[in-house]
Image (cartoon, rainbow, N blue to C red):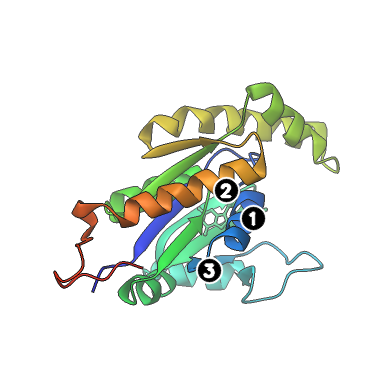
Amino acid sequence: MQEGLLLIISGPSGVGKGTVCRHLMTIKEGLNLSVSTTTRLPRPEEVDGKEYFFTEPVHFKAMVDAGAFLEWAVVHGHYYGTSLDVVDEAISKGKTLILEIDVQGAAQVRQKAPESVSIFLAPPSMETLEDRIRGRGTETNEKIERRLMTARQEMNSYILYDYVVVNDKVEKAATKIGAIIDAEKCKVSRGAQPPGMGGEDG
Ligand code: 5GP
């Protein structure tokens, strides 16, 4: 059986990873979005086990010590991690699993799972990214400045990824990612085979 596809979608803070991933899920069948574990509080519309597994810092740290995460990072002051169980379960069943994670986490996954495919979602320009970060509204100037600085640093890591997709329009970016998934599934080096040769492509 063909192994599953582990797809990292990452990029700077504020680029719109979540929006693009949610749109991608609506236009392409057969994708699974990984549910991360986090210590941040749930937003009003969020449900435990759906958007995230919400947990206490002490429990998160115990999971880190037990080696339960493929990757984890501190993002905007909260812990976020991808549990190995979630990844193993999907990949062993031949599924396509999407990790929507920050650039620190992406670097860890690339190292620990070199067969993964990584996509850097980039803003159309630095000005757009800055507008988006400032536009979030509710935060203090100091926090916004810190986010801008982090985002500028995160932009430099694009060179380490397999693909770069510019998020000028959500629909266009999601369609391009869908095309990358199709191409990756056809790759001979990923184990795709013509009919009658024992392979099954889905
Ligand atoms: P939010 O709290 O707004 O849903 O996500 C904040 C940031 O955390 C986003 O950049 C998102 O990509 C990142 N993130 C979400 N889950 C994970 C994870 O499991 N690992 C890492 N490294 N980053 C994550």
**Image quadrant containing the N terminus:** bottom left
Pair 1/3: label in front: 1
Which badge, 2 or 3, is on the more N-terminal residue? 3
- Residue 51: x, y in percent? 64, 68
Secondary structure category for the residue under label 3: helix
In screen coordinates, is 33 left or right of 118?
A: right
Disc 1 Cβ-to-ligand 1 distance below 8 Å: no
What is the distance, in whole Å, between disc 1 and disc 3 at their CAs? 29 Å
- Residue 15: x, y in percent? 63, 39
Tags 1 and 2 in contact by the CB under 8 Å rule?
A: yes
Say which amino acid is labelled 1.
His
Mark 2 crowd level (few <14, some 14–19, many ≥20, 10 Å Cα): many
Q: In this view, does 97 lie above or below 109?
A: below
Dividing the image into four quarters, tell me where ligand 1 lies.
Answer: bottom right
Say which amino acid is labelled 2.
Ala
| The quarter of the displayed image where residue 134 is located | top right
Q: Which mark is residue 60?
A: 3
What is the residue that sits farthest to the right in this orientation? 138
Disc 3 Cβ-to-ligand 1 distance below 8 Å: no
What is the distance, in whole Å, between disc 1 and disc 2 at their CAs? 6 Å
Tell me which residue sits at (36%, 35%) in the image: 160
Tell me which residue sits at (35%, 61%) in the image: 5
Mark 1 crowd level (few <14, some 14–19, many ≥20, 10 Å Cα): some
Q: Circle 2 sits on which residue?
A: 174
Of residues 142 and 44, the one nearer the viewer is 44
Of residues 175 and 137, the one nearer the viewer is 175
Secondary structure category for the residue under label 2: helix
**Image quadrant containing the C terminus:** bottom left
- Residue 10: x, y in percent? 51, 45
Which badge, 1 or 3, is on the more N-terminal residue? 1
Q: Circle 1 sits on which residue?
A: 23
